[in-house]
Amino acid sequence: MRVLVTGSSGLIGSNIIKLLKDKFDFIGLDITKNNQSPDIPTIFSDALNINDIADSIKNVDAIIHLAANASVHTSWEKALSNNISLTHNIFETAKNIGIKKIIFASSNHAVGNFEMDIPYSNIVKGNYKNLSPGKYKLIDHKVPIRPDSQYGISKVFGEATGRYYHEYYNMDVSCLRIGTFNAENKPNNIRSLSTWVSYRDLSHMIEMCLINQKGYEIFYGVSDNLWKIWDIEHAKSTIGYKPLDNAEIYRTK
Ligand SMILES: NC(=O)c1ccc[n+]([C@@H]2O[C@H](COP(=O)([O-])OP(=O)(O)OC[C@H]3O[C@@H](n4cnc5c(N)ncnc54)[C@H](O)[C@@H]3O)[C@@H](O)[C@H]2O)c1
């Protein structure tokens, strides 16, 4: 399977390519160099103008769309151009050249304002008083969108775009509401004991989406953390997601 990865040189792109490169035929698209997997063929071009390189990606079977301003503090102007317009261009070009599958890097920030509500507000602060793991309702793929930032709004736009291209053009679209994928590959604060996703778990989720996902789906890209606030049962039952990691083993206090 030939897979185009936009944002292939970034933290997620370079690490998932490293873990999955023996299983898929990757082509990168980025404006910077991939220091982790320099041998992956890469098109150095602004993904906003993906239409300009349409001829060179015609034989691709699927796109993992990661290129974006990845910070929750992204300004509206940057979110509008590099997340919203760029994502629309990815779907439109894919449709025009017949690419039928897209995995879109959405974010937990599409529903981040649930963290204002009890019990999630307490859990992400490490206050577990009167709570037991598995005994509170998890935030699932059916909850209303509740973006917490301009960045979150841009990810909601990407999810809506995915739904449109699925319903009108029959593309298979997975929107991954990714939790915390960080440079340390382990939880680095109290919140991330709930939100962490390991490199191997997210790579595995992406692999399962490439192989098994059909239709339009939203999955939470999170490891099987003891104090997770997001549902992973939907990903388990739909695509066969089997996470191996749990942030709890890193808890120091
Ligand atoms: N890291 C996380 O915890 C996390 C959580 C939720 C969602 N996400 C999403 O996952 C995706 C990847 O995140 P990351 O942490 O790897 O970010 P990153 O900043 O490390 O990587 C983004 C990559 O995209 C490239 N890029 C940006 N704009 C581009 C453009 N116009 N054309 C071509 N390339 C461009 C950058 O050069 C960079 O290599 C982003 O969409 C981000 O919003 C990340």
Image (spheres, helix red, strand yellow):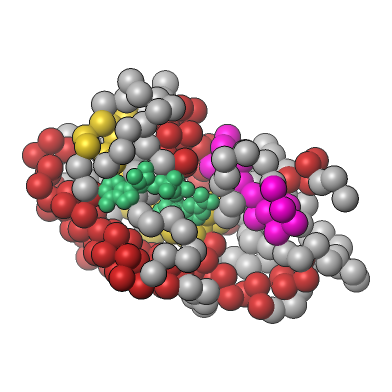
**Of the pair 6 and 233, the residue shown nearer to us:** 6
Q: What stretch is highlighted in magenta?
A: 188-202
Residue drawn at 31 percent across, 70 percent down: 77
Tell me which corner region of the image, top left, top right, bottom left or bottom right, holds residue 29.
Answer: top left
Above-or-below relation of 244 to 218: above
Q: In this view, does 123 lie to the left or right of 215?
A: right
Q: In this view, does 158 lie to the left or right of 113?
A: left
**Of the pair 82 and 173, the residue shown nearer to us:** 82
**Residue 199 included in the magenta stretch of the image:** yes
**Residue 85 included in the magenta stretch of the image:** no
- Give how far across and how far down residue 63 sits, in percent: 30, 44
Residue drawn at 75 percent across, 56 percent down: 190
Q: Is residue 125 left or right of residue 16?
A: right
- Give how far across and how far down residue 166 sits, in percent: 29, 61
- Give how far across and how far down residue 95 sits, in percent: 18, 54
- Give how far across and how far down residue 117 sits, in percent: 69, 79
Residue drawn at 63 percent across, 68 percent down: 139
Above-or-below relation of 205 to 157: above
Above-or-below relation of 114 to 40: below
Q: Is residue 7 left or right of residue 231?
A: left
